[in-house]
Image: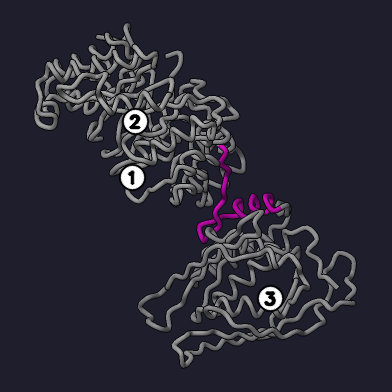
Amino acid sequence: MATVDLYDTTLRDGTQREGITLTVADKLRIAALIDRLGIPYVEGGWPGANPKDTAFFKAVAAGDLPLERATLTAFGMTRRPGRAAAHDPVLGAVLEAGTEVVCLVGKSWDLHVKEALGTSLEEGVAMVADSVRLLRGESRRVFFDAEHFFDGHAHDAGYALAVVEAAAEAGAECVVLCDTNGGLLPDAVEAVTTDVVTRIGGRTQVGVHVHNDTDCAVANSLVGLRAGATHVQGTINGIGERTGNANLCSIIPNLKLKWGLDVVSDDDLRRLTHVAHEIAEVMNLVPDPHAPYVGHAAFAHKAGLHVSALAKRTDLYQHVEPERVGNSLRLLVSELAGKATVVLKGEQLGIDLTEDGDAVGRILDRVKDLEHVGYSFEAADASFELLVRDETGTGTEFFRIESFRVIVERREDGRMVAEATVKVWLPGPDAVAAPGSPPPLTERRIGTAEGDGPVDALDQAFRVAVNGRYPHLADIHLADYKVRIIDAKAGTGASTRVLVSSTDSEQEWETVGVSRNVIEASWQAMSDAYTYGLLHHHGSTPAG
């Protein structure tokens, strides 16, 4: 095939996923992000179906969405049974939206026509033809979504084909075969699409729109294209009703990198991971870390054998270069790691370990010992970096804790208040460092503070003790805090693992701590977080 047209329905079909509610501003932002990917068609919603979609199209008409490349489409339904298309309110709302392209959905399964619409098959065909003809008469380009087409073709192929033929004859420039229930496997999609392309492919473009109820939506889309379709619909991150729609974040790189079709430019493809994650953020969704191409773990390698091979050639255990889709190679450090993992991680940190076998051995031994008692370095890259720097003498001791104490008090009014005291050693204001070494820790400080809980109190007390000596600490904040019981059978004496995500608004990093005391585990993770943040901030020298 020479080309494939991409059609995004994230803002309409995608929003039918459970738990997703978007504002008009959210929809405008998402549409702009999809436009950045170079996707030719962006479906904005169903004007007239709800106030929000109507307001969205009004905002677009007012100039609130300056699309650079994408064509915005409005979605609607064919006229109702027994009503003239010119007087149908649904079609009127679609026309009022003012988009160049309209995507109409109509019934192509005879069972739905008879049972859901309660009308004859002849009227079902006429509803499609009349609606397309009206929109074409108003100079709109029309795509026709043949709802439940594959189920309809299996039940009454003659009627299903009559519907798409009527749409084509009335002027639809693309008829889209929909697996609305998402229940088909690739062989059925390919056979039916081939049949339709053979019959009407010379008169109009054929497309596919499939759902993921058999976990085959991407595969079904690809075989539909292989069978002759040249238009494919889907959503970013595969979101949609029930189990979702075909995932454009997989379809796009498959077409581009596997089939060699320039459906988007190389620069557009490099934006894919960023756009996928940003749209998930707008929708208040956690991006799937194991999603193909764009997931955080899509190019993560844990086994020592794999990493050893990657050190020689990155394509030995990667099917594409992650940078091509805006992602990156990640080497996970765990008890499964080998020497190659440590050497390559050191290279990423700017530490050459290729000739320091003793240090590599010490690092591996520490990792295995620590993971044996519950640490997890694959989820805490920052703590691993500090471990490497400790073993290679390239770290910096910004502070040293002498002791800390936390008290939790239930007050008379029922409020729970935590109070912490931290005793810490810092570089003195007149401390002189030897060349290449950090200043000596000669000043002892004490900080006390209250917090909403013991961890918050400990954080506040530490900051009081440091009291401006490291100004960048004011920019470092807790982004996430997770506690896991490692050996639950030990009851209240069980070890706990604390994972902390921190940010300074420029970067985010993860640290880990393990102890039978959750406060101690929390402090380990927090201490690593402070140290890492200071280490990677230019100018993190103590203030006088």
Residue type, numbered disc 3: Arg
Of circles 3 and 2, the one toward us is 3
Compared across the picture, whether 286 is left or right of 142 comes to: right
What residue did someone put label 2 on?
219
Residue farthest toward the bottom in the current orientation of the protein: 412
In the picture shown, does residue 7 fall above or below 483?
Answer: above
Relative depth, front residue between 40 and 43: 43
What residue did someone put label 1 on?
17
Label 3: how many Cα within 10 Å (few below 14, some 14–19, many 20+): some
Quadrant containing the N terminus is top left
Compared across the picture, whether 59 is left or right of 510 comes to: left
Q: Is residue 49 visible?
A: yes
Q: Which mark is residue 446?
A: none
Q: Which residues are magenta?
A: 326-349
Instruction: Check disc 2 and report its element: helix, strand or loop.
Output: helix
Residue type, numbered disc 2: Ala
Lower position in the chain sequence, tag 3 or tag 2? 2
Q: Residue at x 54, y 31 (%)?
A: 63
Spatial distance from mark 1 to mark 3, Cα to Cα? 43 Å
Q: Residue at x 90, y 77 (%)?
A: 430
Of circles 2 and 1, the one toward us is 1
Label 2: how many Cα within 10 Å (few below 14, some 14–19, many 20+): some
Spatial distance from mark 2 to mark 1, Cα to Cα? 21 Å
Is residue 221 found inside the magenta-colored segment of the image? no
Cβ atoms at labels 1 and 3 below 8 Å apart: no
Q: Which mark is residue 463?
A: 3
Q: Residue at x 49, y 27 (%)?
A: 39
Residue type, numbered disc 1: Arg
Spatial distance from mark 3 to mark 2, Cα to Cα? 54 Å
Q: Residue at x 25, y 22 (%)?
A: 87
